[in-house]
Image (spheres, rainbow, N blue to C red):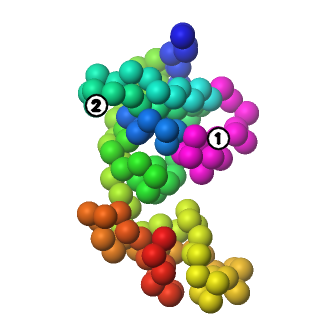
Amino acid sequence: MNIDAIQNGIVIDHITAGRGMRIYDLLGLDALDVSVALIKNAASHASGGKKDIIKIDSTMSIDFDVLGYVDPGVTVNIIREGKLVEKRRIDMPEKLTNVIRCKNPRCITSTERAIDHVFRLTDPRNKVYRCVYCETKA
C-alpha cells in the first residue's frame, strides 16, 4: 500500500490498533474537505505489533483532549513544507469538556441542555473520569 507524504498537515501516529476510527469520528474528520488517510493495522516496530495512523493533508486545530482520552500516548506530528516541525506526545487530560456525555439520567446535564458535559480525571492509573456535577463514572 502506498500513501503519499503530506506537504502541510498533521500526522497522528502510534494510535493503538483499532482506535483510529474512534478518533476519526470524535475529531469530526469526515466533515473536512481535504484528504484524510486512516491507516489501520500498520506494522509497528516500536510496539512490536500493529498501530493505526491518521494523516490529514491540511493544518487545522486538533482537540488534544479527545486524543488523550481515547488513546494516551499517541503522537501528533506537524508537517510544514514536507518537513517535521513539531512532534507532541499526548497524555490524558485532567479535564474533559463536551468530549463524552454523562450517562446518569438524573444529572443536571440531562435536563439542562445548555450545560457543558465536564469530566475530571479521578484515577489516572485506571483511566477513570467522573462527571463534575453528579460524580458518575464515564
**Residue 120 in which image quadrant:** bottom left
Q: Quadrant of the N terminus?
A: top right
What's the magenta region?
Answer: 21-35
Mark 1 lies on a secondary structure that is: helix
Looking at the rendered image, the disc whose residue lies closer to the viewer, 2 or 1, is 2
Location of residue 4 in the rendering, given as x and y in whole percent from the top left corner: 55, 13
**Image: 27 above or below 128:** above
**Any part of residue 66 in sight:** yes
**Image: 22 above or below 69:** above
Location of residue 97 in the rendering, given as x and y in whole percent from the top left corner: 52, 68
* Marked residue nearer the N-terminal end (2 or 1): 1
Question: Disc 2 to disc 1, how far (Cα)?
Answer: 26 Å
**Any part of residue 85 in sight:** no
- Mark 2 residue crowding within 10 angstroms, few (<14) / some (14–19) / many (20+): few
Location of residue 127 in the rendering, given as x and y in whole percent from the top left corner: 35, 63
Locate residue 50 relative to residue 11 in the image: left or right.
Answer: left
In the image, what residue occupies the spot 72% across and 42% down? Answer: 31
The residue carrying mark 2 is 47
